[in-house]
Amino acid sequence: MFKNLIPKIFYDRLEDGLEFFVDGLGFEVQYRDANMAVIARDGAKAYIVESPEYAAKDRPELGIDTDDVDAVYRELSARAPQLLHPNSSKVALKPWGSREFAMLDKTTVCVNFRQWPEQA
């Protein structure tokens, strides 16, 4: 059974990643050393890695499924309104069936928060 897919997200400076995920999105640091941090919130987890070389090559767009996208939106838009993605700053129904909004950091890492309809 697969349980989680845990991405590595590369930043020029580790502090930029921590600012976005910890300060902006409410993740907690579970481990940290000079070049890497493990962050988690509820069932979501990621590795934030300082690597200017890889950060220059990849600015990922990540998705987090949630069971209450409206509650997540209320929390994050109050916590860090400056991080709301300009093209997805409100919860909206998408053509593929999910309701979602997005947050964007200053390095263009994007996190989409999604809620899928209940399965009948």
Image (cartoon, rainbow, N blue to C red):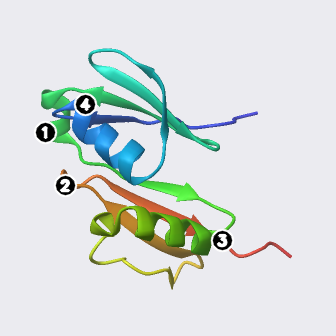
The residue most toward the top is: 33
| Secondary element at image label 2 | loop
* Picture quarter with the C terminus: bottom right
CB under 8 Å between discs 3 and 4: no
Compared to 29, does 16 lie above or below?
A: below
Q: CA distance from mark 4 to mark 1?
A: 14 Å
CB under 8 Å between discs 2 and 3: no
Count numbered badges in the picture: 4
Label 1 vs label 2, nearer the camera: 2
Which residue in the structure is indicated by mark 3? 116
| Secondary element at image label 3 | loop
Which residue in the structure is indicated by mark 1? 56
Which residue in the structure is indicated by mark 4? 14
| Secondary element at image label 1 | helix
Label 4 Cα neighbours within 10 Å, binned few <14 / some 14-19 / many ≥20? many
Q: CA distance from mark 2 to mark 3?
A: 28 Å
Q: CA distance from mark 1 to mark 2?
A: 13 Å
At 71% across and 76% down in the image, what residue appears? Answer: 117
In the image, what residue type sits under mark 3?
Trp
Q: CA distance from mark 1 to mark 3?
A: 33 Å
In-front residue for pair 56/38: 38
